[in-house]
């Protein structure tokens, strides 16, 4: 059978397709995405939901001169396939392959680089302003999910766009889901719009609504009778959005090609900011994903027939689950503990906490800044808030951590999950900057556990502290060490000596301690003894131990899965410099001063010399 998809090398090829062919293309795209993502892993359910919308957008608009900005970009697989990346799509998220998000260096059709949420309206507005300054005529369109719309930046941009009145089309892709179920008052509002009485109102409002469309106005009224049935989407007053200066169109069925084409054609002729509210089904076309859109939001390789992951189950718990379990236990005896997630209840393990303590878990939506200041407010009233963010997303909350928490020395515990290299999500998601953007904050304690048991102990310690604490841990499984039931406190600022001897000291932090032990083993096999230190703290450092090492050792090797610039090794260099302990040589192992690409975590650790073997080799070179 001939596949239309095989003939689509650029979006221009869609221009001559009939409605029936466009529908068939959407069908083929879904099959293609499912087949490929089953082998590579990726963001399946978000991408399946917007296949029809993507096809309709490329039929109606002329890209790349018209600009489409995808929010987060995890739903842009159909976009990638239709814009020249079909044949490379099997390399999705693999080392050297197609990236998981729109990326300006990958394609001229990727108008803006994304990965973090809620940026699209700001970026698109910037493009619209630039267009007008240059007297150009292109359209600018954003596709933003209902989850992404919970982010403050999206509201800031709506506020600005509504005021400026530029031509801008915002497509709200409402599937009632963030990664987990969407939350918040805006989500409730959208839900009311979704369920508002429709068709009876439609006829009455049609005339009024068509009059409001400046570009077509009266002309369209003449044909209103004719199109009455097809404009069944101009139904609900756009309340909030209209008040903010947008023309609201919707809600429409975003999985219906005919309706999408009609609405987009109309929107193309309209002026000013327009918000098209589309209702889509997350996971559309693959039943397991439709039933469990959260499981298929981002998934590893899976079996298409059963919908089950290919990866064999392991008994070793993830850092996330150890953190979550420990927090649940601690909250049993400490009623002041409350937990906060920014739209990641499953990803951070806090969903379980909410099952035990439903009134003590707060999902604030994709609002990391608010999450931190909310915690500061709670802490100011004697509560013990534990906010858990992915390291990369906490970047947004720099000032809230500094100004609202640290400056007031409030006892907020910030868990930074997915710290270090995360793998296939790539440069937008590696959590490799946190030591650098945190360790200069006064009052802050920063710890990172060498294994999952130490994570549990550190959480107990953090809860007992009176100032702000960051607890940083990686994606994935722990080391499989025994987990102590008791919470035995860890002395603040005290490192752990794991091995002593020789004239080389490995000083590792977090998951890099295990790497140091392996490097030390390899040197021992060469007949070279070494000392291994588990630093435990990036701040405060174990000053006394480091002074001793500087006096006794020839070489200190610092190992971190953070950028070297301003990181853990830099902190040690600063300390040695302040103490004028300049005789010891310091070899810093960590990540270089460029963005780290996608790849499996192991591939990246190998490439960036963060394995036992590569570090042992570097040390051998260094001491020669
Ligand atoms: C700043 C930030 N925080 C959290 C995330 C993680 N994240 C990625 S997609 C997503 C949900 C987005 O929901 P929505 O925009 O509705 O898209 P859908 O997946 O439903 O299509 C979240 C929370 C992120 N990418 N960026
Ligand atoms: C797009 C996005 O930001 C999330 O879906 C992220 O990919 C989740 O990462 P984890 O798989 O580590 O939870
Ligand atoms: Mg959504």
Image (spheres, rainbow, N blue to C red):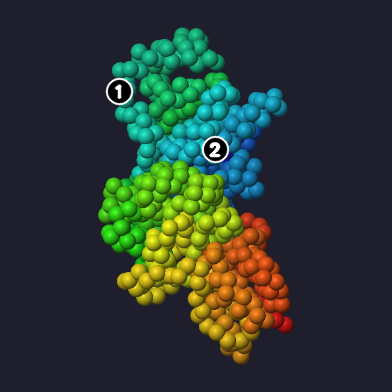
Residue 570 showing in the rendered view: yes
Q: Residue at x 69, y 74 (%)?
A: 581
Dot 2 alpha-carbon crowd within 10 angstroms: few under 14, some 14 to 19, many 20 or more: many
Query: Is residue 263 placed above or below 293 in the rendered structure?
Result: above
- As rendered, which of 592 and 296 lies closer to the eye? 592
Which residue is pictured at 37% across the width and 19% down the height?
229
Q: CA distance from mark 1 to mark 2?
A: 31 Å
| Mark 1, residue position | 197
Classify 128 as above or below 307. above
Q: Position of residue 616 (x, y in %)?
A: 62, 79
Residue 22 shows in this picture: no
Secondary structure at badge 1 equals loop
Q: Residue at x 45, y 21 (%)?
A: 243
Residue for badge 2: 120
Residue at 71%, 74% in the rendered image: 582
The image shows a total of numbered marks equal to: 2
């Amino acid at each position: 059978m001939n596949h239309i998809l095989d003939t689509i090398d650029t979006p221009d090829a869609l221009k001559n397709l009939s409605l029936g062919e466009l529908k068939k293309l959407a069908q083929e795209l879904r099959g293609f995405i499912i087949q490929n993502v089953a082998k590579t892993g990726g963001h399946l359910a978000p991408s399946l939901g917007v296949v029809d919308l993507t096809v309709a957008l490329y039929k109606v608009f002329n890209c790349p001169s018209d600009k489409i900005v995808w929010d987060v970009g995890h739903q842009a697989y159909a976009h990638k396939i239709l814009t020249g990346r079909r044949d490379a799509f099997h390399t999705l998220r693999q080392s050297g392959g197609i990236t998981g998000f729109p990326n300006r260096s990958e394609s001229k059709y990727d108008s803006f680089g994304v990965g973090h949420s809620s940026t699209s309206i700001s970026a698109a507005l910037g493009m619209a302003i630039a267009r007008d300054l240059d007297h150009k005529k292109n359209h600018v369109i954003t596709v933003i999910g209902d989850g992404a719309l919970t982010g403050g930046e999206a509201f800031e941009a709506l506020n600005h766009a509504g005021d400026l009145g530029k031509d801008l089309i915002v497509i709200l892709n409402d599937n009632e889901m963030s990664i987990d179920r969407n939350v918040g008052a805006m989500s409730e509002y959208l839900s009311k719009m979704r369920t508002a009485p429709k068709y009876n109102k439609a006829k009455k409002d049609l005339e009024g609504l068509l009059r409001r469309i400046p570009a077509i106005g009266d002309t369209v009224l003449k044909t209103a009778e004719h199109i009455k049935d097809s404009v069944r989407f101009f139904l609900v007053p756009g309340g909030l959005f209209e008040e903010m200066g947008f023309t609201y169109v919707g809600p429409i069925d975003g999985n219906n090609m005919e309706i999408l084409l009609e609405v987009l054609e109309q929107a193309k002729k309209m002026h000013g900011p327009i918000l098209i509210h589309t209702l889509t089904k997350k996971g559309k076309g693959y039943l397991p994903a439709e039933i469990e859109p959260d499981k298929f939001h981002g998934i590893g390789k899976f079996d298409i027939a059963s919908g089950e992951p290919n990866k064999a189950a392991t008994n070793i718990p993830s850092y996330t689950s150890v953190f979550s379990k420990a927090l649940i236990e601690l909250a049993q005896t400490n009623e002041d503990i409350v937990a906060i997630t920014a739209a990641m209840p499953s990803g951070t393990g806090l969903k379980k906490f909410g099952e035990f303590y439903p009134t003590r878990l707060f999902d604030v939506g994709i609002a990391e800044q608010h999450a931190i200041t909310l915690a500061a407010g709670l802490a100011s009233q004697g509560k013990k808030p534990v906010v858990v963010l992915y390291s990369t997303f906490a970047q947004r909350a720099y000032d809230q951590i500094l100004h609202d928490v640290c400056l007031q020395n409030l006892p907020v515990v910030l868990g930074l999950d997915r710290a270090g290299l995360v793998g296939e999500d790539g440069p937008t998601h590696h959590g490799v900057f946190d030591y650098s953007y945190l360790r200069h904050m006064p009052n802050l304690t920063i710890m990172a556990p060498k294994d999952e048991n130490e994570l549990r102990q550190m959480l107990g310690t953090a809860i007992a502290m009176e100032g702000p604490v960051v607890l940083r841990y990686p994606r994935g499984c722990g080391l499989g060490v025994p987990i102590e039931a008791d919470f035995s406190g860890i002395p603040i600022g005290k490192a752990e000596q794991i091995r002593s001897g020789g004239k080389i000291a490995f000083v590792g932090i977090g998951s890099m301690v295990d790497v140091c032990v392996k490097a030390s083993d390899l040197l021992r096999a060469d007949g070279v003894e070494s000392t291994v230190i588990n630093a435990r703290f990036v701040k405060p450092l174990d000053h006394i131990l480091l002074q001793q090492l500087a006096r006794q050792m020839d070489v200190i090797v610092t190992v971190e899965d953070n950028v070297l610039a301003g990181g853990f090794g830099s902190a040690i260099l600063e300390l040695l410099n302040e103490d004028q302990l300049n005789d010891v040589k310091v070899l810093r192992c960590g990540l270089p001063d460029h963005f780290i690409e996608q790849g499996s975590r192991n591939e990246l650790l190998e490439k960036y010399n963060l394995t036992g073997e590569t570090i042992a080799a570097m040390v051998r070179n260094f001491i020669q």
